């Protein structure tokens, strides 16, 4: 006697214990209650003024740039006029720094004070005595730009690899020697590398590796090392260091980013979070997709979301967008730190990420390592890579716990038109594509012991609201 049964999927998030249906793999889809469109990337746009939010794109080609290799943002407040200027700095493949002032209706880039660097500089913008300053440090020089003066170069400056400010003290990691943390109690970067009444260093004398990134979190200063985290304690000119975490795998320190309630970072074992007391997994199920080497991985945070550009092994013999050519990274993971849901954007090769927040907008700006490296981009809601729809994919695990023979007879879905549903059964496949938006029903007959569902689309909009599969048990 046959018993009619149904497999019902009414939510597509990462795991549903009550139905025993879990996600095997997905990309370019947002897997929540409905399978909806993911984030995408597009050319960055900026409002013409505080009142005219019509956006313009930077005239990068007009500046003669062939590639955008770095981006910096900072504000300059002028107390004399009580005005604030928002500045975007682009570092190009000609080693020059170009500037655009936002909200001025001018999309041109201008070579900034004849600035040139041998590599994209790291930067730190900060306020001192009611005015703004920015430090730009590269492999060949350091420049300091204070609000009311032209930038000036610091002679014989060390190569700074990261900076942060806490309680009026500037902290820096340097390239060599990379086991020293330098500080300047007067925020004067010119003193970094020189011992004085206002500057000095503390040595890291354990086996956690070199100091790679220094950050301020919850009014404390932490140093991310190759294999751990150290805490810097500074009290009344006395500085000391303590070990707070040791990792058994390498930390990709360019992925370290301070979020609202945690510091996020990547290792070969996955994405982790540090709350100032302990390190724990972020629960993002991508560890099996991570290669051993991910040195091009980069991350930044904005609006309680962690944006991680990295390389993932999808192991499906497909080539999605940037993967058809040489690439460094091929994915972006966006983690919503409110509920730890996440999206994977596949097919874009991101080089750097920069969060920007002003009075009228907040954006995650991005540069590109390969494809689209001639423009400045931003993360968007459009589920496209510029003018090309992101190909979407979602697959379940095996839908049957026990491998016994069943007769599969019907597939009913509520979805957009043009979405492909592929039933993989015992080494075979049976596929259907929705013919209209809304309810779609397909009838058929085949026997199988194992069943897996794949959903895919080449369209920009390809939502799926529900799926049920009807079958009979013998």
Image: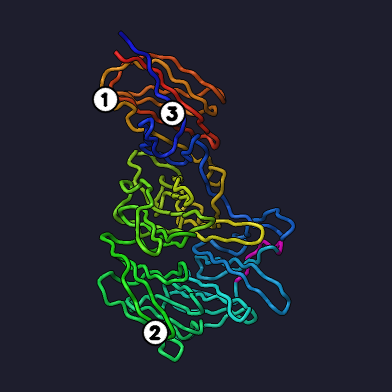
Separation of marks 2 and 1 at Cα, in angstroms: 65 Å
- Determine whether the residue tagged by mark 1 lies in a helix, strand or loop: loop
In the picture, the disc for residue 402 is: 1
Q: Mark 2, mark 1: which one is toward the viewer? A: 2
Residue under the point 59% across and 55% down: 44
Per the picture, the main secondary structure of the magenta-coloured stretch is loop
- Determine whether the residue tagged by mark 3 lies in a helix, strand or loop: strand
Sequence-wise first label, 1 or 3? 3
Q: Residues within 10 Å of mark 1 (few under 14, many from 20)?
A: few
Q: Residues within 10 Å of mark 3 (few under 14, many from 20)?
A: some
The residue sitting at the bottom extreme is 197
Q: Residue 130's quadrant in the figure? A: bottom right
- In this view, the residue in front, 95 or 461, is 461
Residue 205, magenta (yes or no): no
Q: Which residues are magenta?
A: 104-111
Task: Name the residue carrying label 2.
Answer: 238
Sequence-wise first label, 2 or 3? 3
Classify residue 269 as left or right of residue 443: left
The residue sitting at the top extreme is 1
Q: Residues within 10 Å of mark 2 (few under 14, many from 20)?
A: few
* Residue 259 image position (x, y, % from top left): 47, 60
């Amino acid at each position: 006697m046959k018993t009619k049964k149904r497999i019902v999927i009414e939510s597509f998030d990462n795991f549903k214990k009550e139905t025993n249906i879990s996600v095997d793999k997905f990309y370019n889809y947002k897997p929540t209650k409905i399978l909806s469109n993911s984030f995408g990337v597009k050319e960055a746009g900026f409002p013409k003024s505080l009142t005219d939010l019509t956006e313009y794109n930077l005239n990068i080609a007009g500046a003669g740039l062939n590639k955008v290799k770095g981006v910096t943002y900072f504000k300059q407040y002028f107390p004399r006029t009580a005005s604030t200027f928002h500045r975007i700095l682009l570092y190009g493949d000609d080693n020059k720094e170009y500037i655009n002032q936002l909200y001025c209706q001018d999309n041109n880039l201008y070579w900034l004070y004849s600035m040139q660097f041998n590599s994209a500089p790291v930067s730190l913008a900060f306020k001192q005595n009611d005015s703004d300053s920015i430090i730009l440090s590269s492999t060949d020089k350091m420049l300091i730009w204070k609000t009311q003066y032209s930038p000036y170069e610091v002679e014989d400056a060390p190569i700074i690899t990261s900076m942060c400010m806490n309680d009026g003290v500037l902290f820096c990691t340097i390239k060599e020697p990379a086991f020293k943390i330098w500080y300047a109690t007067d925020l004067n970067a010119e003193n970094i590398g020189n011992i004085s009444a206002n500057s000095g260093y503390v040595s890291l004398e354990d086996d956690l590796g070199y100091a790679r990134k220094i950050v301020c979190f919850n009014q404390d200063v932490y140093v991310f090392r190759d294999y751990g985290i150290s805490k810097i304690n500074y009290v009344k000119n006395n500085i000391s260091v303590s070990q707070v975490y040791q990792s058994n795998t390498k930390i990709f320190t360019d992925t370290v980013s301070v979020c609202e309630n945690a510091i996020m970072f990547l290792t070969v074992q996955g994405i982790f979070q540090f709350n100032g007391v302990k390190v724990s997994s972020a629960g993002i199920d991508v560890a099996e997709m991570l290669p051993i080497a991910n040195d091009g991985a980069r991350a930044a945070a904005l609006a309680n979301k962690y944006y991680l550009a990295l390389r993932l092994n999808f192991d499906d013999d497909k080539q999605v967008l940037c993967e058809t050519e040489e690439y460094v990274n091929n994915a972006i993971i966006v983690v919503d730190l409110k509920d730890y849901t996440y999206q994977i954007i596949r097919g874009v090769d991101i080089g750097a990420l920069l969060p920007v927040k002003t009075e009228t907008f907040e954006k995650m700006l991005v540069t590109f390592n390969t494809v689209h490296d001639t423009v400045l981009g931003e993360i968007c809601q459009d589920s496209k890579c510029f003018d090309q729809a992101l190909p979407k994919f979602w697959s379940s695990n095996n839908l049957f716990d026990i491998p016994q023979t069943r007769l599969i007879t019907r597939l009913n879905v509520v979805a957009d038109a043009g979405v492909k549903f592929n039933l993989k059964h015992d080494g075979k496949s049976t596929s259907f594509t929705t013919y209209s938006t809304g309810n779609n029903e397909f009838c058929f007959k085949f026997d199988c012991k194992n069943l897996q569902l794949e959903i895919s689309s080449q369209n920009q909009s390809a939502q799926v609201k529900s799926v049920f599969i009807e079958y009979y048990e013998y």
